[in-house]
Amino acid sequence: MTRLAAWLDTACVNAGVALAWFGIPLLIVFAALEPLARWVVWGGDAPFGEASTVAFLAMTMTSFGYAYAAGFHVRLDILSRRFPGRLNDAIELAGALLIVLPLCALIVLDGTESAWRSLQQGERWADSSRGLQWMVRAWIPIGFLLLGLAAIASALRSLLSLFRR
C-alpha cells in the first residue's frame, strides 16, 4: 500500500508540474498573439482567447491534485500541531474518505457527463464560432480525478500510519 500511495502521489505531482511547464509558456504566447491576431487577421474573433482559457483552466484543475499530493493544501496548522500523530492521521483519513472522495466522485461523474453532452451538442461560447466549450468542461472532472487520486494516497498513508502506531 505504501508503494501505491507513493505512485499515486507521484502521478498527481507529475501531472500538475507537466501542465504548468506546458501551460505557462502557452499562456504567454497566447497573450502575446491575441491582440496581434485581432488587429491583423481575425477582427473580434481571435482563437487565442479561448485557447488561453483552456490552458489556464487545465493548469488550475491539475494544481488541485498537485497541491494535495505535495502537501501544499490548506490545513489548520494551529490545531494540528497540538494534536498527537494518531489523531492527525485519523482526521486526515476521515477528511479524505468522508469529504474529499465523495465530492470528487460527484464532480467527476457529473462533470464527465456535462463535458460529453457539450461535445455532442457542439456547445460554443456566445462570442465564438468554434465549439471548444467541451474542452473547458472536460478539465473539471480531470482535475477532480487527480484530487481524488491524491486523497486516496493520503488516506492509504494515514491508514498505514494508524495501524503502525
Image (cartoon, helix red, strand yellow):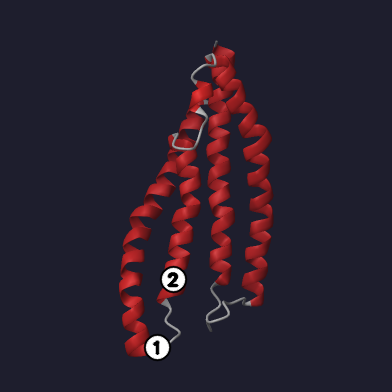
Residue placed furthest toward the front: 78
Kindly identify which residue carries mark 1.
Answer: 42
Query: Which residue occupies 31% across, 62% down?
Result: 25
Q: Look at the picture and state if 98 lies above or below 49.
A: above
| Image spot of residue 96 (x, y percent) | 61, 33
| Quadrant position of residue 44 | bottom left
Most foreground residue, 84 or 17:
84
Q: Which part of the image, by quadrant, shows the C terminus?
A: top right
Kindly identify which residue carries mark 2.
Answer: 51
- The residue type indicated by label 1 comes to Trp
Looking at the image, can residue 107 be seen?
yes
Q: Look at the picture and state if 139 lies above or below 63.
A: below
Q: Look at the picture and state if 12 lies above or below 26.
A: above
Look at the numbered discs 1 and 2 and tell me whether their residues touch, using CB distance below 8 Å. no
| Image spot of residue 121 (x, y percent) | 66, 76
Q: Distance between the residues labelled 1 and 2?
A: 15 Å
Query: Which residue occupies 43% across, 48% down?
Result: 15
- The residue type indicated by label 2 comes to Ala
What kind of element bears circle 1? helix
Numbered tag placed on residue 53 in the rendering: none
Query: Which residue occupies 37% across, 84% down?
Result: 38
